[in-house]
Amino acid sequence: MPFLCALVMAVAFVLYAHATRRGKFAVWEELLDELALRGDEQLLDLGCGRGAVLLAGARRLSEGRAAGVDLWRAVDQSGNARRVTSRNAEAEGVHDRVELHTGDLRDLPFGDGEFDVVLSSLAIHNIKDAEGRRRAVAEAVRVLGPGGRLVIVDIGRSVARYRDVLAELPVSGLGVRPLGWRMWWGGPWMRSHVVTASRTGG
């Protein structure tokens, strides 16, 4: 029994380390590939943190811009600071097309329909109350223009709740799917899913 416990813990550690260091990056590259960006989009990353997804999106924009918004709280992600993300953007050579904003996902500092693409990676679940998470999803849709696309990656049952919220908002093509073992945070009991949708309206 001690051997089996140690083996399970070792496997969980390996899966978590892989998801953190390699898996999430590979998965997000595939999700961005699916968007087939033209390069002139206005893109927003909700809860951008140190910028992994934000900068991956920015690299695909030749003429557009990538905005990231966060409260920059270390409790949500280690090393989470605006200056860190800015340095990362410089290191990646995309600083000229990246904008960083301080803001609450429940009350975004942007106008209606301002973006073509809204992304979020493992951020909305950090909002503790269900009403706050609902407002964050609604805000994501509000700032999307007609035909704009939404991609939210998060853990487990949270995504099912986002789907239910989106079902009552002006979106189409609503879908949810698991992202596989590369984004298991220690094991299948902590799986990541993605919810996707497009903004409707004229």
Image (cartoon, rainbow, N blue to C red):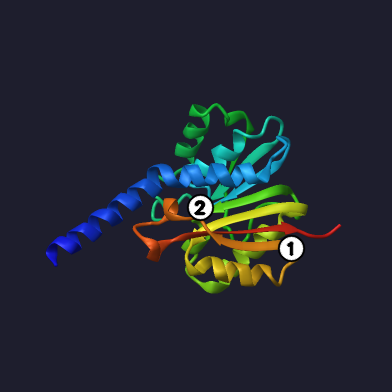
Q: Looking at the picture, how far across and down is residue 97, in whole percent?
A: 63, 32
Image point (59%, 33%), residue name: 59
Rendered image: mark on residue 71 = 2
SS for callout 2: loop
Closer to the eye: label 1 or 2: 1
The N terminus lies in quadrant? bottom left
Mark 1–mark 2 distance (CA, rounded to whole Å): 27 Å
On the picture, is 59 further left or further right than 184? Answer: right
Q: In the picture shown, does residue 66 fall above or below 5?
A: above
The percent position of residue 41, horizontal first and vertical second, equals 72, 40
In the rendered image, which quarter contains the C terminus?
bottom right
Q: Residue furthest left?
A: 2
User: Residue at point 38% right, 66% down?
Assistant: 189
Type of the residue with mark 1: Val
Mark 1, secondary structure of its residue: strand
Asked whether the viewer can see residue 182, the reply is yes
Q: Residue at x 63, y 72 (%)?
A: 164
Tell me residue 96's x, y (percent): 62, 29
Which residue occupies 36% across, 46% down?
18
Determine which residue is flagged by label 1.
Answer: 171
Residue type marked 2:
Leu
* Figure quadrant of residue 186: bottom left
Q: Residues within 10 Å of mark 1 (few under 14, many from 20)?
A: many
- Asked if the residue at tag 2 contacts the one at tag 1, i.e. Cβ–Cβ closer than 8 Å, the answer is no
**Mark 2 Cα within 10 Å, few/some/many (few <14, many 20+)?**
some
Earlier sequence position, callout 1 versus callout 2: 2
Residue 53 vertical placement versus 160 (above, below):
above
